[in-house]
Structure formats: C-alpha cells, structure tokens
Image: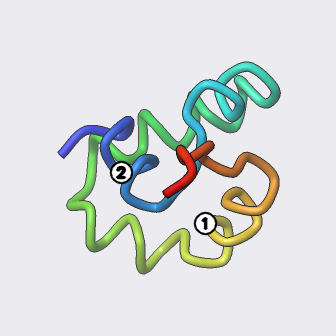
Amino acid sequence: MTFAEFCIKKKISLEKFSTIDPALYNELSVYFEQVHPESFTQQKKFLINPLRRLYPLDQPPK
C-alpha cells in the first residue's frame, strides 16, 4: 500500500493535503514508507481524524 492509497482509504484528499501542508505531507509520507500501514495508523491515529476533517476527499453524489 502506498501513502496515496492510504489517504484515499482514510478519505483524505491527497491533492488538498499535499498542496496546503506540504511539510506535514512529506513527513508522513516518508514515515509511512518506513513502517507497516497498521503500525502507521496506530502511531498516527490522533492525526488522521483532524486531517480527514481538514482535507476531506470529494466524493461524487450517489
């Protein structure tokens, strides 16, 4: 799994996140590549929800 796939799975807009906060995006992306996705989620779970609210993934209407 890549960091981009992880963001989509967690409903975080990769485009908005990487554009608005590139430093945090780069930091998390580098760290994600070094650990297992489940480990990343456990260690960064308190960052994931705020990121999801700040950079929501645009979903087409159903």
The residue carrying pointer 1 sits among few (fewer than 14), some (14 to 19) or many (20 or more) residues within 10 Å by Cα, namely some
User: Who is closer to the viewer here, 23 or 12?
Assistant: 12
Q: Tell how many labels.
A: 2
Instruction: Indicate left or right for 32 with 14 as reference.
Output: left
- Identify the mark at residue 4; answer none if there is no mark: none
Mark toward the start of the polypeptide (1 vs 2) = 2
| Distance from Cα at disc 1 to Cα at disc 2 | 11 Å
Instruction: Indicate left or right for 33 with 14 as reference.
Output: left
Residue at x 77% of width, y 62% of height: 53
User: Who is closer to the viewer here, 46 or 15?
Assistant: 15
Instruction: Indicate left or right for 18 with 20 as reference.
Output: left
Residue at x 61% of width, y 66% of height: 48
- Discs 1, 2 touching: Cβ within 8 Å: no
Q: Horizontal and vertical percent for residue 47?
A: 67, 66
The residue carrying pointer 2 sits among few (fewer than 14), some (14 to 19) or many (20 or more) residues within 10 Å by Cα, namely some
Q: Is residue 45 above or below residue 21?
A: below
Q: Horizontal and vertical percent for residue 58?
A: 62, 43
Q: Residue under circle 1?
A: 48
Secondary structure at badge 2 equals helix
Residue at x 67% of width, y 72% of height: 49
Q: Horizontal and vertical percent for residue 8?
A: 42, 47
Looking at numbered disc 1 in the image, what kind of residue is underneath it?
A: Ile
Secondary structure at badge 1 equals helix
Q: Is residue 8 above or below residue 52?
A: above
Q: Residue under circle 2?
A: 6
Q: Horizontal and vertical percent for residue 39?
A: 31, 72
User: Who is closer to the viewer here, 28 or 8?
Assistant: 8
Instruction: Indicate left or right for 48 with 24 as reference.
Output: left
Residue at x 27% of width, y 72% of height: 38
Looking at numbered disc 2 in the image, what kind of residue is underneath it?
A: Phe
